Image (cartoon, rainbow, N blue to C red):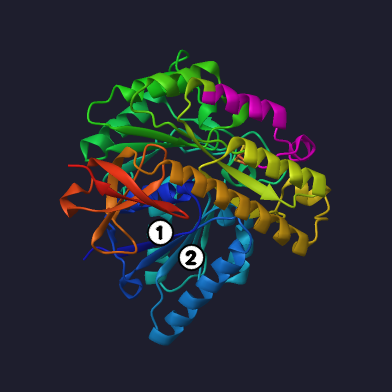
Amino acid sequence: MARKYLIETFGCQMNFHDSERMAGLLEQAGYEATKDEADADVIVINTCSVREKAEDKLFTRLGEIHHAGLETGERPIVAVAGCVAQQEGDAILQRSKAVDVIIGTQNLKRLPMLVDGAVQRRESGGRAFPSLDLDPLEDISFPLGLAKRHDSFKAYVTIIEGCNEFCAFCVVPYTRGKERMRPVAEIVADARNAVGTGAREIQLLGQIVNHYQAPDDPSCDFARLLERLNEIDGLERIRFASPHPRHVTPRMIDALRTLPKVCRHLHLPVQSGSTDVLRAMRRRHTREEYLDLVARLRDAMPDIALSTDMIVGFPGERPEDFEQTLSLTETVRYHSMFSFKYSPRPNTLALKRMPDDVAEAEKTRRIVELQALQGRIQMELYLQALGRVEPVLVDARSRRREWELSGRTPGNTIVNFSGDPSWIGRTVPVRITGANPNSLRGEAVT
Ligand code: SF4
């Protein structure tokens, strides 16, 4: 009988797709998926260290698995993958008895081999030598192998791994390594394969997608890649996350404006509205450059929806810097925003050189004010959409109301409306009839 695996994922889209890749690798090696922990021979915990308390979360989970094993006398093989694994490596093995395999972010392809090794060790008498495979120098990222995608209509497609920017607050360059570009031939084949199995939308993934330069075709930059993907028959929508403001080129703006399948939505992380704070963050763009870019995007596409990431309370952020964040938010009028209070992350420049000098209560005050402002702007934008007919790609039943469907506009706003479940996976015209803080309501136009 085939051994069963269960993957638990914390974190971002990148991690979610890594879990799809690990699922694909384990299934090629003969393992079968299960959703029932009691039934799992192998549990893979795919960790994320971008936010605070990631390690606490991991060790709490490992403790639960360990105690469940003591009670039943049977413990699954446990593998820890992802950014916390890459960063903490051996320290995890020192702290937890529940772990059999630690695998780094750049070594995923060896997961089945390491899990098989752990199974054999277990069968021959114990956990004596857990495996650790973190070597970032041995890059075996590409080719990626076949992912087992969880969403039938939307497919993640990796185009770049790693990042060379080293923003002062960010752990990614330390956990995911230096930037590596995936060959364009492999990206197009992956996208075609996803569309062939039912995907209507692909989302390109990379830390800085718009830095893309194909290693197998000198003429293929990010704009050209979008053109190549736009030609795929059966594909309806192309999205990507995330671009870096300093790598948005006129060619890329033109591709967004002219290619019909590329959604008019840009997630454009800014992180702060103050040039002084941006300099301290090592973002390599100023407030003025960012606002100029937004103006050029809006000139080219007045209907483009923008979203962003914002950090408050970065070391040295003065009240007047925070005011600049508020005023930039007012000026740009984002459709959505991910906002966070700064917290130091392991290895980063900010942790090593910048005292975390904004009091926690002040960080809280600032984030509450920023989120209230963003909530007001978001609602104003939503109310402007009332009466408009939007093409909504239906992806599921609504989470709150069983009888409703849920999908997204090209601008990436969630719309809930009544409809036939057979519409899931189709693009349906929907008239917008109402607005909630984070979604719209509508009715299908027949
Ligand atoms: S661009 Fe900056 S924030 Fe984004 S992944 Fe790279 S280092 Fe992190």
- Residue 357, given in percent of the width and then of the height, sits at 83, 55
Relative depth, front residue between 322 and 131 = 322
**Disc 1 residue lies near ligand 1 with CB under 8 A:** no
Q: Quadrant of the N terminus?
A: bottom left
Residue extending farthest top: 219
Task: Determine whether label 1 and label 2 are within 8 Å by CB.
Answer: yes
The magenta segment: 271-298
Is 164 covered by the magenta stretch? no
Q: Please rate how many residues cluster around mark 2, counting C-alpha atoms within 10 Å: few if below 14, some from 14 to 19, many from 20.
A: many
Q: Please rate how many residues cluster around mark 1, counting C-alpha atoms within 10 Å: few if below 14, some from 14 to 19, many from 20.
A: many
In the figure, residue 282 lies in which quadrant? top right
Mark 2, residue position: 100
Question: Which residue is found at the position 57% from the left and 39% from the top?
Answer: 333
Reading the chain from its start, which is encountered first: label 1 or label 2?
2
Vertical placement of residue 144 versus 373, above or below:
above
- Residue 376, given in percent of the width and then of the height, sits at 56, 50
